[in-house]
Image (tube, rainbow, N blue to C red):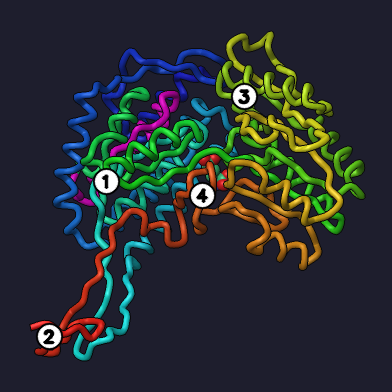
Amino acid sequence: MANLNDSVRAALDACGASGYEGPHATRTPLTGEELIGTVEHTANDVDQAIAKAQAAFREWRNIPAPVRGNVVKRWGELLTEHKRDLAVLVQAEAGKSMSEAMGEVQEMIDICDFALGQSRMLWGKTMPSERPGHRLMETWHPLGVVGIISAFNFPVAVYSWNTALALVCGDTVVWKPSEICKLSAIGADALLARAVKDCDAPADIHQLILADRAAGEQLVNDPRVALVSATGSTRMGREVGPKVAARFGRFLLELGGNNAAIVAPSADLDLALRGVVFAAAGTAGQRCTTMRRLLVHESIADQFVDKLVAAYKTLTIGDPRDESVLVGPLVNKASFDKMQNSIAAAQEQGGTLLVGGKRVLEDQFADAYYVEPAIVKMPSQTDIVREETFAPILYVMTYTDLDDAIEVHNEVPQGLSSAIFTSDQAESEKFLSASGSDCGIANVNIGTSGAEIGGAFGGEKETGGGRESGSDSWQAYMRRATNTINYSGELPLAQGVKFL
Ligand code: UN1
């Protein structure tokens, strides 16, 4: 296999990145070896980045939205051209299979297309005024500087959902990527810099911050940052939300999930099997949308779980630079330790480990953590099942009545994604109804992960309530003004009030 840092350097060069090298190196989850080091920004650099983004906003907000759209159009073209380069960087830092890393870059391309269209659709409503000779309408304006804090598991896609929309909406962005995914960030940002240059847009509309957690806190606390869009753990969101709210800033949170699927007796079991295995074991269980709980009807439970266990035994685990590999490494040792602790806790709480859970390839990679995805059969939804462990553990439970299954389904603190596998329309409608799934994403005959960018993405409860990417999520990046225009030549007051 080619030397990893040679491939990484070649990918960064191809993206047009320069001037990023420095002493701060992180380890790749693929082998545990050190990747190329990067520069580290100081608190003063962060301050300057916000100031530059704020200054650029004064110009950017006045450029017509469809013209702003050209920047994301060009970014999308460059991302298409350099899809594999950026995927190499994503794989080196997040440990994904090449197909999933390419899929992540495809999400970026898709949101660029979407945002380009949106740039001509930042529409406001007109409402009938109660007064003659008056017009009532709303207009949407850019907010200002958007601070983006992103996580390791989708190091570039989630950032791009925010950036592409923020830019067409007329905002400028300051991005603090994950501390362990700086090279992917440098590649993605270099491509955006090229798009900005090719379109003669103001150079400072995007700022990249390479720094640790303190830089994120700076974005959270700085009143010049109008919107903080943060992806990460519920613990992180619990700190970010109140701090931004205290200064009356806006926040958009995309936090933990504890996603479940219900498999009903009428389900197409082969289809359900593929849906469950991808959602539960894909990306080594490190998506916020990963399926972590399975509720199977008791009449098919033995049959379905046997099939699932058999399918898990066929999963290829290893260095995903080998393109036949489906399951790459966990991100680091801490993640591996958490997985082990959760499996042990599940066993203490009455669970039976049916398959997986063991570390593999330890001889080959002392500092990389490859694990067999695990399935644990649980007698009920115990405390550990209510927690999100960011690793491939699928807790399996059985049910007899769909209403009870939906109760159990909703009885966790998180509310991101959910699914039902069924051929019974009444069951599927029930799951999608007001008394069905309480999640931001509710699917039928599809797993919990792998959402398309065209829908709004996000969830309820401890998932944070934010919505990113498609549908009308653009509104989060703008402020609304209500305008009443009087062309009557009189001054009738609303509600029939008389004065003077
Ligand atoms: C995430 O894990 O933070 O729906 C985002 C999915 C992807 C995005 C996941 N489209 O799984």
Residue 226 — which label?
Answer: 1
Q: Position of residue 377 (x, y in %)?
A: 82, 33
Q: Which residue is mark 3?
A: 329
Q: Which mark is residue 458?
A: 4
Upstream in the sequence, badge 2 or badge 3?
Answer: 3
Spatial CA span between label 2 and label 3: 69 Å
Nearer-N-terminus badge (2/4) = 4
User: Which circle, 1 or 2, is nearer the viewer?
Assistant: 2
- Please state the extent of the stretch shown in magenta in the rendering: 174-202
What residue do we see at 82% from left, 46% from top?
296
- Nearest-to-viewer mark from 2 and 4: 2
Q: Which residue is mark 2?
A: 491
- Amino acid at circle 2: Leu
Along the viewing direction, whichever of 67 and 9 lies nearer the viewer: 67
At x 70% / y 58%, what residue is drawn?
A: 444
- Left/right placement of residue 337 relative to residue 313 reads left
Task: Report x, y in % for residue 476.
Answer: 36, 55
Q: Position of residue 500 (x, y in %)?
A: 7, 83
Q: Is residue 51 left or right of residue 68?
A: left
- Can I make out residue 176 in this image? yes
